[in-house]
Image: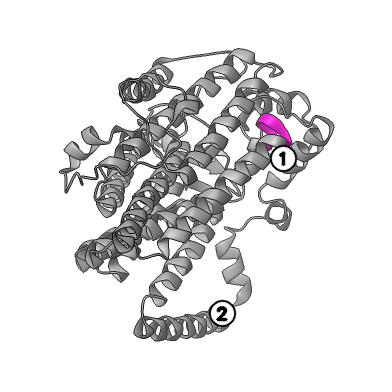
């Protein structure tokens, strides 16, 4: 395989040919990185390789083979490319992505479980190589990007149905008992319901408002996503979904004056209805309902998360290079545990915050690189989401709508990541979902860059 350093630094006009509309299964054969959205589903109560005992079971092997097959295909295709063309803006993002991977790999040298940290670093690189190959491919063969999101929604819907099918037979696989809160349908490692159901709702709301598919179909999936989010009893998922829906509404309002008036009117109506509900039901009862009867202490500590975050910050102030990728926190937190939490520390596998997990994994430099990567992606995405670059207005609008929707989905991941670290942990489904959203954003941006430069050449010629 040609190393990244040999990527063509000169922008060469690609031979762009759209792959057109593909059936559901042909789509995944054509773009196998989207198979990572399936997981695959794991029928056991815990995820990943045990960081303290080095236990690897059938399900761990299945996950690694699943990821390995997709990664091996990507390596083979990149090795046979005559020239790897990638625009400078996107190439810069992946340089930092691989720099972050090197920091994760280096952290294995001081990790309390070196083999596990190195194994997870290997999976990180294998995943990122798969996404690089995808970007190189769609640079010349762009798909129907909105179709990508609609197919992803169908994957999430199938996974949610699988969770519901398993519920009567193996409830412990997908449900967890939270003291003072009750049972939560989280999905376990079968499927992350707190992530996939908000995504179903957001994609459906976006397609409904912008008339990108049948209104009845959008409304059906929207109700499924909303209902699935509520049954998780996760405040984080609910708040993230609400904030993301507001963002979808703002994007829709900006698309026309009439939409702007409707958005303002609906916002006022929502405020009035909320005030009426507050007056009738009572603030105390609503607060209790929202917090599921949890104690004030539990609410203030975000169910114990703030104590975990304090531990990570204090430890990394004394150890700026962190604890070691993935395995470090799992081992060191148990050894230094003196926080007096109400939960069993042996069941806490990560920092319960994506950003603090990166800090715990490889220190302050890794966190700075991670934030830089996200900043570059957000800047690039919003820049081209606002820009009209393609001559065909219908095609341009559909592509830009897909880009905006993917940006909303990424925002939802980052918001949910304030209370969950799974977006930074290989072998966890949210890790692959967030990177799929990023790949869509970068893939569309690549096409926009090519179209913009081709248009400029046409106008100047």
Q: Residue at x 17, y 37 (%)?
A: 26
Which percent across, then down, holds residue 266?
42, 82
Residue marked by disc 2: 278
Q: What stretch is highlighted in magenta?
A: 359-364
Q: Residue tagged by mark 1?
A: 308
Q: Where is residue 258 in the image (x, y as percent from the top left)?
A: 35, 85
Q: How is the rendered protein coloured? A: one colour
Task: Give residue 75's quadrant in the image.
Answer: top left
* Left/right of residue 451 with respect to residue 365 in the rendered view: left
Asked if residue 360 lies in the magenta stretch, the reply is yes
SS majority, magenta? helix
Q: Residue at x 31, y 25 (%)?
A: 82
Badge 2 local density, few (<14 within 10 Å), some, or many (20+)? some
- Which residue is at 72% across, 18% downward? 110
Dot 2 or dot 1, earlier in sequence: 2
Q: Distance between the residues labelled 2 and 1?
A: 34 Å
Position of residue 316 measured from the top left corner of the image (x, y, whole percent): 78, 34
């Amino acid at each position: 395989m040609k190393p990244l350093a040999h990527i063509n630094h000169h922008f060469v006009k690609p031979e762009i040919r759209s792959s057109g509309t593909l059936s559901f299964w042909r789509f995944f054969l054509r773009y196998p990185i989207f198979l990572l959205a399936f997981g695959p589903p794991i029928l056991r109560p815990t995820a990943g390789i045990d960081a303290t005992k080095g236990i690897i079971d059938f399900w761990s092997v299945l996950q690694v083979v699943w990821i390995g097959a997709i990664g091996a295909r990507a390596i083979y295709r990149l090795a046979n490319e005559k020239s790897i063309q990638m625009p400078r803006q996107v190439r810069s993002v992946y340089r930092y992505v691989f720099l972050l991977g090197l920091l994760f790999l280096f952290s294995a040298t001081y990790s309390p479980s070196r083999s596990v940290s190195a194994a997870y670093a290997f999976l990180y690189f294998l995943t990122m190589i798969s996404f690089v190959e995808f970007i190189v491919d769609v640079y010349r063969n762009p798909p129907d990007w909105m179709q990508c999101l609609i197919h992803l929604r169908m994957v999430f819907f199938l996974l949610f149905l699988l969770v519901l099918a398993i519920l009567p037979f193996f409830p412990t696989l997908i449900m967890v008992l939270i003291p003072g809160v009750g049972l939560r349908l989280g999905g376990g490692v079968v499927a992350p319901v707190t992530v996939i159901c908000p995504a179903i709702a957001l994609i459906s709301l976006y397609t409904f408002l912008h008339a990108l598919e049948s209104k009845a179909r959008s409304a059906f999936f929207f109700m499924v996503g909303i209902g699935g989010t509520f049954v998780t009893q996760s405040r984080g998922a609910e708040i993230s979904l609400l904030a993301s829906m507001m963002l979808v509404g703002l994007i829709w309002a900006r698309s026309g004056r009439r939409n702007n008036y409707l958005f303002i009117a609906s916002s006022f109506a929502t405020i009035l209805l909320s005030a009426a509900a507050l007056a009738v039901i009572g603030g105390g009862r609503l607060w209790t309902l929202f917090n599921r009867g949890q104690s004030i202490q539990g609410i203030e500590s975000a169910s114990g998360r703030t104590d975990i975050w304090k531990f990570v910050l204090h430890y990394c102030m004394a150890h700026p290079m962190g604890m070691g990728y993935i395995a470090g926190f799992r081992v060191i937190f148990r050894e230094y545990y003196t926080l007096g939490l109400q939960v069993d520390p042996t069941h806490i596998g990560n920092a319960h915050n994506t950003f603090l997990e990166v800090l715990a994994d490889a220190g302050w430099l890794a966190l700075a690189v991670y934030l830089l990567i996200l900043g570059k992606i957000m800047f690039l995405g919003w820049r081209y989401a606002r820009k009209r670059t393609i001559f065909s207005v219908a095609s341009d609008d559909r592509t830009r709508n897909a880009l905006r929707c993917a940006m909303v989905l990424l925002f939802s991941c980052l918001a949910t990541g304030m209370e969950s670290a799974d977006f930074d942990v290989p072998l966890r489904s949210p890790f692959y979902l967030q990177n799929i959203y990023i790949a869509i954003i970068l893939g569309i941006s690549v096409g926009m860059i090519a179209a913009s430069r081709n248009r400029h050449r046409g106008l100047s010629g």
